[in-house]
Amino acid sequence: MNSKYQVNSSIRPYHKVLSNGLTIVTVEMPHVHILEVAMFVRAGLRFENERNNGVSHFLEHMLFRGNKEFPDSVSLNREFEMIGRELRASTLTEYTYYGFNPHLTQLERGMEIFSHFFAEPTFPNIELERQIILEEYLEELNEDGVNVDIDNQACELLYPGTPLSWPTIGKEKTITAIDKKMLEDYFKIFYSPENMILAVAGPVTHTPVEAMAEKHFLRIPKRGKRVPRDVFVGTLEEKQNRPAFRFQFDSDSQVQLQICFRAVSYNDPEYFQVCLLQRIFDDGVTSRLQQALREDRGLVYSVECRATSSSDTGTLDFDVMVSKEKILEVARVLFREIKTFIKEGPSQEELNHVKQRYFYELDFDLDDPYKQNLRYGFSKLYSQDLGPEEEWDRVNEITTEDIWNVAGKILIQEKLNVIVVGPFNDEIKKEIERIVYDY
């Protein structure tokens, strides 16, 4: 491994705050041939209440329906389709993302259309969009009307009584109740320029991007309230002193098992240790879980370990889907692998391997405008910028002892949550509980 990161010196990030409070980020990437324009907004599930749950997602949909400049969804989306790749969006727990890829020759027109998108939406055809959202909502339900999405089940177990326990899409009752006034009020409060980051990454330079932003995005008036970067810090109580369980029966062909350990946020000093820990368990065919469950025993088609994090919390998750006949053996192997890691820790060879793959990803990201918008745009929502050189240095300094210590803090019974969704029976339920309590 190199002793020092060799950064692509042609990438240069810039940022400026406009007079209306909108933050502009430009990432100059002269070596690529595609650009991305993105907007990150401090608006999402955690800003909702029980009455308007789902309003962030509903609003995201409604912005595609039209505005004063483009009165309907067809005329609006045709404009985006005529200048490059179509507009896309996603609503998450703490923010909403919008992005598109205009052709370089159409950037000015793209910025103009994008600014109208956020300036004066008119919220037409609410009932039509409501029917679409209700259909999307049904995708997570079984034939009994139960939400069987295992991530939603996990959040209900981990964060009861908080917005994090609710589905981002909302529930049928709240989706049905959302009206135009609720959408307008939520939009005026949270879609304030001070809560928005406009990021442009690709073969562009900052000065003309800034000029386009000032020309078009100053039409968005100051409104609502400013959400601080640390808005969620200290608001979540995670009290747990023993393993917790959630079993949800579903007449499926396989059983889903998710093992969640409470971990750290992406702002935590030990976040990168957790990222490497996750990779040791699951980062290619030679990683521990892939070998133990698939390559050596043929028990599963896929198994996943992932570090999930937000601005103030996080989990380390182990996910697998397998037939009812194999679920107990898979559970035993999973917990055996975790216990072995706690007892023995990682080898230097493993650490070197996942570090090298991590550093390759840093290099690959240098050709991806979306990833650079995340690095320099998304980071301004609730965190701080971290350049690839600093990230490389932080990861490079991590030792086997560091990862072992973090694993000893996280992979413990007091932070363990187990979620099972599928066609299990009482025997499976009792045996999984026994496996967990023996962990």
Image: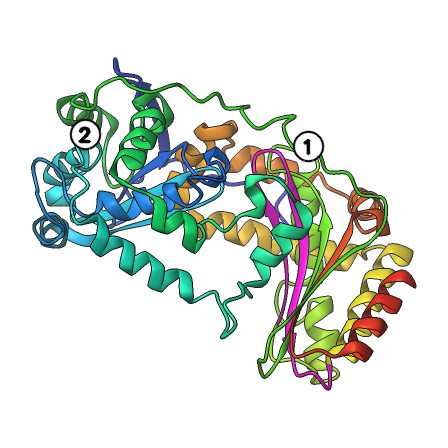
Q: Residue tagged by mark 2?
A: 119
Q: Name the one closer to the observer, 166 or 287.
A: 166
Q: Reply above or below: 250 against 105.
A: below
Q: Is residue 305 magenta?
A: yes
Q: Which residues are magenta?
A: 303-326
The first of marks 1 and 2 along the sequence is 2
- Residue 62's spot in the image, x, y percent? 24, 45
The residue under the point 34% across, 31% down is 186
Is residue 367 visible in this depiction of the protein? no
Q: Amino acid at mark 2?
A: Ala
Q: Residues within 10 Å of mark 2 (few under 14, many from 20)?
A: many
- Left or right: residue 93 compared with residue 203: right
- Quarter of the figure with residue 194: top left
Q: Is residue 11 magenta?
A: no
Q: Name the one closer to the observer, 204 or 130.
A: 130
In the structure shown, which secondary structural element does the residue marked by tag 1 occupy?
loop
Question: Magenta region's main secondary structure?
Answer: strand
Q: Name the one closer to the observer, 133 or 35.
A: 133
Is residue 290 visible in this depiction of the protein? yes
- Residue 234's spot in the image, x, y percent? 65, 26
Residue at the top extreme, as displayed: 19
- Left or right: residue 85 compared with residue 298: left
Q: Residue tagged by mark 1?
A: 269
Q: Name the one closer to the observer, 121 or 79.
A: 121
Q: Could you tell me how far apart the alpha carbons at marks 1 and 2 are, in whole angstroms?
A: 38 Å
Q: Reply above or below: 193 against 276.
A: above
